[in-house]
Amino acid sequence: MRILHTMLRVGSLEKSLAFYTQVLGMKLLRRKDYPDGKFTLAFVGYQDEASGTVLELTHNWDTSSYNLGEGFGHIAIEVDDAYQACESTRKMGGKVTREAGPMKHGTTIIAFIEDPDGYKIEFIQKKHPDQ
């Protein structure tokens, strides 16, 4: 068994696709409209679906925003340099909500950003063998 994808409901598919592909550098893997159901599914990721876990962005055509609820935490992405990832995100118009730095009570370098719908994304700086 393996995890295939995580599904997020998004208010604007175009804004979300721009964020995940341009700001975070993911690839649009596939996209399909379902006119009878009035929704579109778009799958994005760093690897193809056979090789890695991806995100499914679900856009219901008649819904422009969602209550994120209290149960969802965040999506975590490993980055080489969390400080640079924050700077790059900011330059691309993304929202940094927690600047890069050591996590509380630990040494791992983390940061948090938000996508256009307010979903939290954590950058976790890759640990190198000498760390």
Image (cartoon, helix red, strand yellow):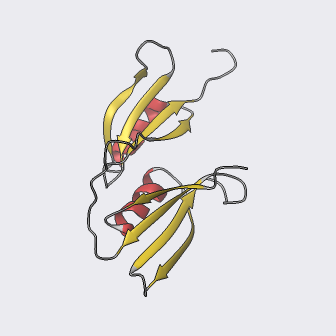
Q: Position of residue 110 (x, y in %)?
A: 45, 27
Q: Nearer the viewer, residue 48 or 72?
A: 72
Residue 82 horizontal side relative to residue 112, left or right: right
Residue at the image position 58 percent from the left and 55 percent from the top: 5
Q: Nearer the viewer, residue 98 or 67?
A: 67
Q: Position of residue 82 (x, y in %)?
A: 47, 31
Q: Position of residue 26 (x, y in %)?
A: 54, 55
Quarter holding residue 74: top left
Quarter holding residue 19: bottom left
Residue 52 horizontal side relative to residue 80, left or right: right
Above or below 79: residue 19: below
Residue 6 horizontal side relative to residue 14, left or right: right
Residue at the image position 51 percent from the left and 31 percent from the top: 124
Residue at the image position 43 percent from the left and 20 percent from the top: 103
Residue at the image position 38 percent from the left and 68 percent from the top: 13
Quarter holding residue 61: bottom left
